[in-house]
Image (cartoon, helix red, strand yellow):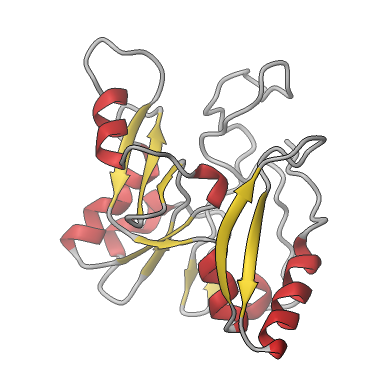
Amino acid sequence: MLAKIDKKVSFSRSRFFRGIVLPPGGPKTKSGRLADQSGFSGDVVIQNGVWQKGKTIFDVVDDLKEGDVILKGANALDLENKRAAILIADTKSGTIGAALRVVVGKRVRLIIPVGLEKRVSGGIDEAVALMNEPGGEGPRLMPAPGEIFTEIDALELLTGAKAKLVSAGGVCGAEGSMWLAVTGKSSQEKAAEKLIKSIAREPAFSL
């Protein structure tokens, strides 16, 4: 998105996260905490086509209005019912808590780009009730009433091809992978194949 604004813009993924889930024995944040924000450079806030570098959603949320858009990732996906939920470690509900104030209060549009590896079974409400039960430990879970956007939606939007999740998993770094059956016109299928290959070897995220 930033490249669409200015091809010369310099953006680094390093430390670009809010709360983060790390594997047992994996890399540690500076403080060793799940939601360590040291070194965070700010959210990507775009106003009138200009990146407001260094600003966060908390700086601008009260100025958002109908017609503005918030993109927020998720941790749980009910693919069948197109619903999502977000892990919460902050006692004030984090960035999604701030976002929902204006999503509901001012009709700001919320789009939730979420990977198919986040899918859960049994429904979002059941998971939310379980995670938020008094006396529990660990993060809480908040349902988010936004527009779900997965790899399936991206392929259809960008190439016109239809995609269906048919299997998932693997080893040696492919543990979160999935197989998509892609159908469409020959040109659409080729465009989808080209798109998938262009991102398949994207470097793993690192702290």
Indicate left or right for 94 with 159 as reference.
Answer: left
Please tell me which residue lies in front, 206 or 25. 25
Question: Residue 48 at x, y = what percent?
Answer: 46, 79
> Which quarter shows the N terminus?
bottom right
Which residue is rendered at x = 64% and y = 37% of the image? 39
Question: Residue 93 at x, y = what percent?
Answer: 31, 36
Examine the rendered structure and indicate whether residue 154 appears above or below residue 86.
below
Which residue is rendered at x = 56% and y = 28% of the image? 36
Residue 8 in view here: no
Indicate left or right for 29 with 96 as reference.
Answer: right
Please tell me which residue lies in front, 80 or 125. 80
Which residue is rendered at x = 56% and y = 57% of the image? 165
Please tell me which residue lies in front, 41 or 15. 15
Q: Quadrant of residue 139?
A: top left
Q: Quadrant of residue 131?
A: top left
Residue 123 in view here: yes
Which residue is rendered at x = 73% and y = 67% of the image? 196
Examine the rendered structure and indicate whether residue 77 appears above or below residue 159.
above
> Which quarter shows the C terminus?
top right
Question: Residue 128 at x, y = what percent?
Answer: 28, 33
Q: Quadrant of residue 155?
A: bottom right
Which residue is situated farthest in the left direction here? 105
